[in-house]
Amino acid sequence: MGKLEAGYIYESPDGIHVFRRPVGDYDSRKKEEINLDTGKPTGRMFNEYPFKEVTTEEKVRNLVYNTPNDMELGQKVRYLFPLEKKASDEYLKFWTCELCGEHTHEVDYDYLGSGTNHLGCELKEAETKHFADGFHEGEWEKD
């Protein structure tokens, strides 16, 4: 197999032909076929092949059928429909741990505590608090 260049996404729609496109560029007209033996372009483009263009509805239907984990499904669907920058910022702001301030949008549900906090952060906080914090000289502190 030839050396593949950095800065490209390599994909094979049929398991036989391999195409590359620049990272971040989703225009199928810019996908060029690559010879895997040499790692060099063959000169043929993706749109020169009779591959069936898959509709967005078919893509979503396939994702739902093949992705049983709802969190993974949501992430894959988001890649199909990129959010505007503002919406993306709002999304990240929502998925933020209140204890450490880091984003939790990619944390598996098993590792989230209450709300959108990291479970680890909540456990550390629980270790530092004592059940009788706020109880002094026989009386509870008033809020």
Image (cartoon, rainbow, N blue to C red):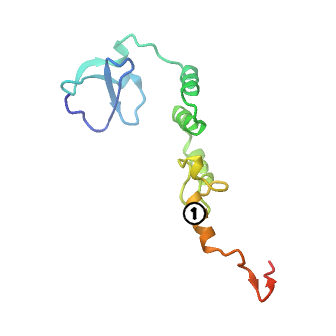
Image quadrant in which the C terminus is located: bottom right
Secondary structure under badge 1?
helix
- Looking at this rendering, what residue extends furthest in the bottom direction? 137
* Count of marks, rendered view: 1
In the rendered view, would you say 134 is above or below 105?
A: below
Question: The N terminus is located in which quarter?
Answer: top left
Q: Please determine whether, in this image, residue 70 is positioned above or below residue 57.
A: below
Q: Position of residue 25 (x, y in %)?
A: 40, 32
What residue is rendered at 63% in x and 68% in y?
126
Residue depicted at x 25% and y 35%: 5
Q: Quadrant of residue 31?
A: top left
Q: Callout 1, which amino acid? A: Cys
Relative placement, left or right, of 109 versus 49 is right
In the foreground, 15 or 78: 15
Residue at horizontal 59 percent and vertical 56 percent from the top: 96
47 lies left or right of 86: left
Place residue 116 in its image quadrant: bottom right
Rendered view: 100 above or below 21: below
Q: Which residue is mark 1?
A: 121
Q: Residue 135: give x, y in percent of width and height.
A: 76, 82
